[in-house]
Image (cartoon, rainbow, N blue to C red):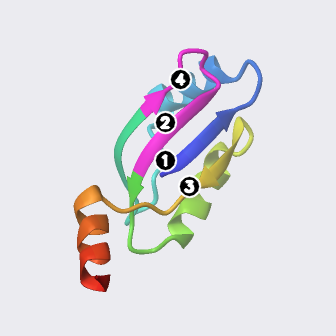
């Protein structure tokens, strides 16, 4: 999960760049889905990759418009299986 914190007033430029240049994802990094808060301050993006370094490459393309927090996550089913295996 990536939380993108938009710089103040940057939302319009973020959407403009995405419209004109796409998500600018390096090969091997897959966009799954996203949710934007109602104030256009943050975007919560679910991404998928086997190579976490690709997130750094992607973030560089957008770092002038915000900053990012990366939180590794797993599905609920994966979490349940992991815990069940520990019981």
List the residue tagged with mark 2: 21
Q: Are marks 4 and 3 in contact (CB under 8 Å)?
A: no
Question: For mark 4, does the 10 Å Cα neighbourhood hold few (<14), some (14 to 19), or many (20 or more) residues?
Answer: few
Report the Cα–Cα distance between label 2 and label 3: 13 Å
Question: Any magenta on residue 33?
Answer: no
Give the secondary structure at mark 1: loop
Establish if 14 lies above or below 5: above
Q: Are marks 2 and 1 in contact (CB under 8 Å)?
A: yes
Report the Cα–Cα distance between label 2 and label 4: 23 Å
Q: Which residues are magenta?
A: 35-46
Classify residue 77 by image quadrant: bottom left
Classify residue 76 by image quadrant: bottom left
Comparing 23 with 43, the one in front is 43
Which mark is first along the chain, 4 or 2?
A: 2
Give the secondary structure at mark 2: helix
Question: For mark 3, does the 10 Å Cα neighbourhood hold few (<14), some (14 to 19), or many (20 or more) residues?
Answer: some
Task: In the rendered structure, find residue 24 and report the number of the disc placed on it.
Answer: 1
List the residue tagged with mark 3: 58
Q: Are marks 1 and 3 in contact (CB under 8 Å)?
A: yes
Question: For mark 1, does the 10 Å Cα neighbourhood hold few (<14), some (14 to 19), or many (20 or more) residues?
Answer: some
List the residue tagged with mark 4: 37
Give the secondary structure at mark 4: loop
């Amino acid at each position: 999960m990536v939380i993108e914190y938009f710089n103040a007033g940057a939302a319009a430029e973020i959407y403009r760049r995405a419209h004109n240049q796409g998500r600018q994802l390096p090969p091997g990094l897959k966009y799954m889905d996203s949710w934007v808060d109602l104030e256009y301050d943050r975007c919560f993006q679910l991404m998928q990759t086997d190579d976490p370094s690709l997130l750094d490459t992607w973030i560089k393309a957008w770092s002038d418009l915000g900053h990012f927090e990366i939180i590794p996550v797993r599905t609920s089913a994966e979490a349940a299986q992991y815990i069940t295996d520990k019981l």
